[in-house]
Amino acid sequence: MAFIAKRPSSLEKLKILGKVAKFDVSGFPSIFAKKGKKFQRFKFIYPAVGKKGRCVRLFKVLQNNACDGNCFYCANRKDRDFKRVSFSPQELARLFIQYYERGVVDGLFLSSAIYESADRSEEKMLTTLHLLRYKYGYRGYVHYKILPGTSESLIEEAFRLADRLSINMEAPSAKYLTKLSPTKDFSSQLLSGLGKIAQLNREKSLRAGITTQLVVGAARETDREILSFSSKLYQEYKLHRVYYSAFMPIIGTPLEGVPPCPPLREFRLYQADFLLRKYGFTPQELPFDEDGNLPQEYDPKLGWALRNPDRFPIEINKADFEELIRVPGIGRLSARRIVE
C-alpha cells in the first residue's frame, strides 16, 4: 500500500520557519531572554526594541529554510538532516496580514536561506513584500534581510520597499569567516553588499537604518577584533546597529562540539558597543585584557574608569556633558539634566 506524504499546512510551516528565524538577532541580548518572553505569544513572534525603548512584536520568519550553503554553525546547512519547508509569496503575505490585522504583531522581519541562488531567493522575498505593500496596502515596519551575493538591482528594489535593511557579516574579518562558512566571500559578497546598501542610504536615508550581525565565540575571535570592526562599520558605513549573537552549538553541524559563548560575553559586547555609538568612546579606550577580551566581572565603562584614575574625581557642577557621560552611573539623560 502506497502512502502519500501529507503537505505541511501554513501554520506548520510557520512553526518551523518562525522557530529557526531566532538565529537572526533583532531584539534583547540573550541574557535578557526572559524579559522578551512575556511579549511572545507565539514562537514566531519576537520582541524588538523600538523608539524610546518600547518593545515591539515582530513577525519574524524565513521564506524558506532549504539552503545550498554549508555554513559550519548553521541549522539550515545543506548537509544537515532536518525538515525543509518554504512559503510561496502569496501564502506568506496572506498569513502575515492575518496576524497584523488581528493586532497580534507590529511589524515583519523577513529573511531566507539561499536555495538555487541568492537572487532567486531574494526575488521570492521581494514578491512577498510587493504583495504586502501593493495588494494588501501594508504600510507598517519591515526589517528585510539582504542575502550574500544579491545583485545590486534587487538590493535597490528592497531599499525602496523596506524600512530597515541588513546583511549578516557574521565575522569581523575574512580570516574568521572561513572558520564559519566555506561558501561565503567576505569582500565580494558581504562587504560589497553592505557597501551598496550604505551608498543608497547616503542618497536617501532608510527610515530605520542599516544593521548587521556578528556571531560571537565560534571562531575564537577576540572582543577587540569584534568591536574594532563594529567601529569601522559605524564610521564608514553609517550603520544604525551591530547585533551580536552568542554562538550556540547545533547538533548535526561541524561545530556541534564547540563550547557555547557565555551570554555575559555577548552582553558586555553590547555595553561596549553602546559606548562606541552613544558615549564617544573609541575601541582603543575600551578596557580589554591581555588576550583582547573585555572583563566579565564589571561593565566596560567602569573598567575604563578604573584604568583612568587621573580623570577622577570631577566637579559635577563644572564638568561638561562629555566628561559627565564617562562617569560610571551617569547616563546621557542624567548628564543632560545636570548641565542644563
Image (spheres, grey):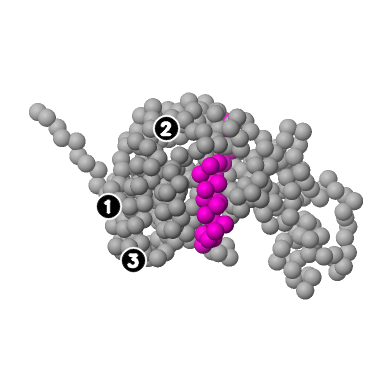
Magenta region includes residue 199: yes
Magenta stretch: give its range: 191-219
Displayed quadrant of residue 52: bottom right
Q: In this rendered view, identify the residue nearer to me: 85 or 129.
A: 129
Q: Which mark is residue 50?
A: none
Q: In this rendered view, identify the residue nearer to me: 23 or 71.
A: 71
Q: Amino acid at mark 3?
A: Gly
**Spatial distance from mark 2 to mark 1, Cα to Cα?**
25 Å
Image mark count:
3
**Spatial distance from mark 3 to mark 1, Cα to Cα?**
16 Å
Q: Position of residue 14 (x, y in %)?
A: 33, 48
Q: Position of residue 102 (x, y in %)?
A: 33, 65
Q: In this rendered view, identify the residue nearer to me: 287 or 161.
A: 161
**Spatial distance from mark 3 to mark 2, Cα to Cα?**
34 Å
Displayed quadrant of residue 19: top left
Q: Quadrant of the C terminus?
A: bottom right
Disc 3, SS: loop
Q: Amino acid at mark 1?
A: Glu
Mark 3 surroundings within 10 Å by alpha-carbon count, few (fewer than 14), some (14 through 19), many (20 or more): few
Displayed quadrant of residue 96: bottom left
Earlier-in-chain disc, 3 versus 2: 2
Please say whether residue 67 is visible from this viewpoint: yes
**Going by the image, does 136 lie left or right of 245?**
left
Mark 3, mark 1: which one is toward the viewer?
3
Kindly identify the residue that appears in the image at 34 percent across and 36 percent down.
Answer: 116
Q: Which mark is residue 69?
A: 2
Mark 2, mark 1: which one is toward the viewer?
2
Q: Identify the residue under disc 3.
A: 137
Q: Quadrant of the N terminus?
A: top left
